[in-house]
Amino acid sequence: TAVVTLALGIGATAAIFSVVNAVLLRPLPYPEADRLVHVAQDMRARNVVDFPIAPGDFHDFRQMTNTFEAIGSVFTFRQTFAGDNAGRPTERVPVAIVSTSLPSVLGLRVRLGRDFVPEDGAPLPEPPDNAAAGQPDGPPPPPVPQPVILSDGYFTRRFGGDASILDTVQQLGGQPILVVGVFEPGVELLFPPGLNIDREPDLWIADRTDFANGSRINVALRVVARLKPGVSQAQAQGDIDQIGAELRERFPIKQTAGVYFRVESMHDDLVADVRTVVWSLMGAVVFVLLIACANVANLMLVRTAARERDLAIQTALG
């Protein structure tokens, strides 16, 4: 009875602690993950939290060079990958549109090909206006392929690990893409579920948005930054509060909506919704373990009390 009671108490505690360790204690699978923060937007006047960031605001965040070592943006969606002559079928795949800096922010590494370079995200020039120049309209120039890095899983599943796919042009959603690299296994995007970010995109495409002249109202971006060594989260929050105040002054719509920005630890933000529940569950099973220990102790006391006469005789006999 004592063994079974203790086994149940210890087993339950060990099982729940493994959950606590995996969810709350273990750092995120990125290098120096303690310096990673998520920049979130709240509209306090409208009771909206974790609203996406506008491209123009992201450009302002990139100027915080005294606070952030690097900063990147991402949004994800589903798109159609065209079939080809090799018999690969048309399929819909999860796609991430990322700033060229995002892989370095998260410390992601490629195992084949190359990583993004700043030129991959350079906005494309506007096509020439032939009518304004008094020239006849000609055929539009062919679209420039967007650089893309494949996930290791998709590279293996769709292309069978064939490295010849590198530097080839494929079709995604009717637009050309240029495969420039393949990530190492295990690459993932870890955001709270409510932000609707695909955890394991198959394709990572360089974002060519002109952030410097980007919209202030069309929001889509989720922003991750890496703090400089020695910079605390409180310092980063103070710096971004200044930017928020400037933006509310420049754009009345942001003042009306009560736009404020938060700098949250990426790990803490990820587990915020489950932290209280997990710790409560851990406390409950520890309490159960204490009850099990108390029950075993009572069993031992009762057994000893039942042998009181025998023990007295043995003591008397020395």
Image (tube, grey):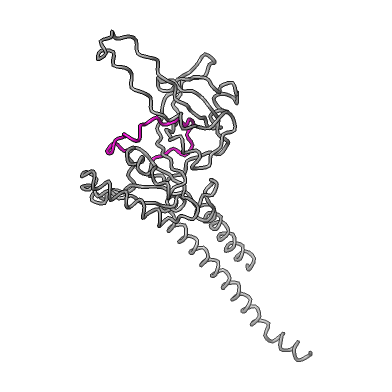
Q: Nearer the viewer, residue 288 or 25?
A: 25
**Image side of residue 257 versus residue 146, left or right:** left
Q: Residue at x 50, y 52 (%)?
A: 229
Total numbered labels placed on residues in the image: 0
Residue pictured at 58% horizontal, 71% vertical = 293
Where in the figure is residue 85, as x and y percent of width and height?
52, 13
Question: In the rendered image, which quarter is residue 176 located in?
Answer: top left
Q: Is 90 covered by the magenta stretch?
A: no
Q: Position of residue 51 (x, y in %)?
A: 32, 44
Residue 264 in percent (x, y) is at 41, 52
Q: Which residues are magenta?
A: 196-219
> Was residue 209 drawn as part of the magenta stretch in this picture?
yes
Which residue is found at the position 61% from the left and 62% from the top? 7
Q: Quadrant of residue 130?
A: top left
Quarter in which the N terminus is drawn: bottom right
- Report the residue that reaches farthest toward the bottom: 316
Q: From the viewer's perspective, is 124 left or right of 255?
A: right
By secondary structure, the bulk of the magenta-drawn segment is best described as loop
Q: Nearer the viewer, residue 172 or 219?
A: 219
